[in-house]
Image: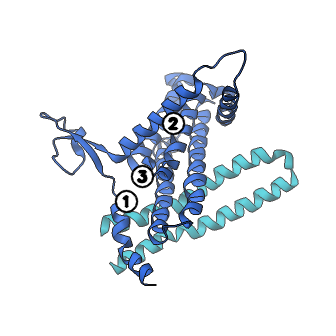
Amino acid sequence: MGGLAIGAGMAVMTGFAAGISIGSATGKATEAVARQPEAAGNIRSTLILGSALAEATAIYGFVVALLIIVMLK
Amino acid sequence: MGYLSEQMSTMGEHLNHRLQVENLFEIPVKNPIPSITLDGGGNPENIFFAESTVVSWIVMGVLIVLAIIITSGFRVRGLTKRQIRAEGWHGMFYGMVKNMLGHEAAGYAPYMCTVLYFIGLCNIFGIFGFKPPTKDLNVTAALAIMTIVLTQVATIRAHGVGGWLKVYKNPMNILELFTRPLSLCMRLFGNVLGAFVIMQLIEHIIPVVLPGFVSLYFDIFDGLLQAYVFTFLSSLFISEAVE
């Protein structure tokens, strides 16, 4: 059981990279909006797309962790 | 602290119980069709209706009844306040979906708008005490498969069968045929399940006041955002296919 918990915890570590990438993307988007406020609509939709793709990695980690706990128990 | 530690110790059991997708009812079949009766539990010869199926029927019912009630008595002259409001809100969402699709694929806007409403309402249905249907992997898988089938149909309609086959000269496109629905389905499922698990934990440990505020983010904001993201990505795939 202890090994399973460690494995699940390591799978959730994907959230680390997702957090960094979404933060970086949002920072860049803020800069872009500050430079060109008239393009805010386009920038927002591109940002949401990028964030959704980046966030998916964290979600995969979460799903894998859940599968480890539920399936291997 | 006695209460907290007691709640903590029963948490795993509670969560396990809440995470299961239960079969709500079953229809007895004398000569079963084997493909329908893959699901376990009970008499394996019956047809099962999972909780997520029944809740998604309720969601559909709510949407249909709302549509009928709101649109009754619409007319061209002498607008009522209700009609103006309804047309304004729907026009906003419809315009948003149309913008995502682009003018070449605008014909798919009604379907994508319906999916937006359905997923949005499914995701926030946790507020009313139901388990959100999108918490079940089967529901999100069905939605993702519908998207990918629609993408193929859109390609055929825009470029003909020859053009559709030409797309698969590039092996990356064959790979995308599988990775796209997988990522669509897993993203929605993982997000809704994650929000559901966190809400269950909070409700189990501190059942007063706090869940109300936290559900504003996890149920409403995250749910609607995921509905938007699903529609956005589906529209992107379709508009890419039509180009």
Instruction: Tell me which label, 1 or 3, sits earlier in the chain.
Output: 1
Pointer 2: residues within 10 angstroms few (<14), some, or many (20+)? few
Camera-side residue of B90 and B140:
B90
Please check whether the numbered discs 1 and 2 fall on a single chain. yes
The residues bearing labels 1 and 2 have C-alpha atoms spaced at a distance of 43 Å
In the rendered structure, find residue B19 and report the number of the disc placed on it. 1
Helix, strand or loop at mark 3 = loop
Percent position of residue B219, x then y: 54, 55
In primary-sequence order, the first of circles 3 and 2 is 3
Report the residue at 53% width, 32% height from top: B66
Q: Is residue B27 left or right of residue B157?
A: left
Q: Which numbered circle lies on residue B169?
A: 2
Whether pointer 1 and pointer 2 mark residues with C-beta atoms closer than 8 Å, the reply is no
Q: Is residue A61 above or below residue A51?
A: below
Tell me the colour chain A is drawn in.
cyan
Residue B57 quadrant: top left
Q: Residue furthest bottom?
A: B1
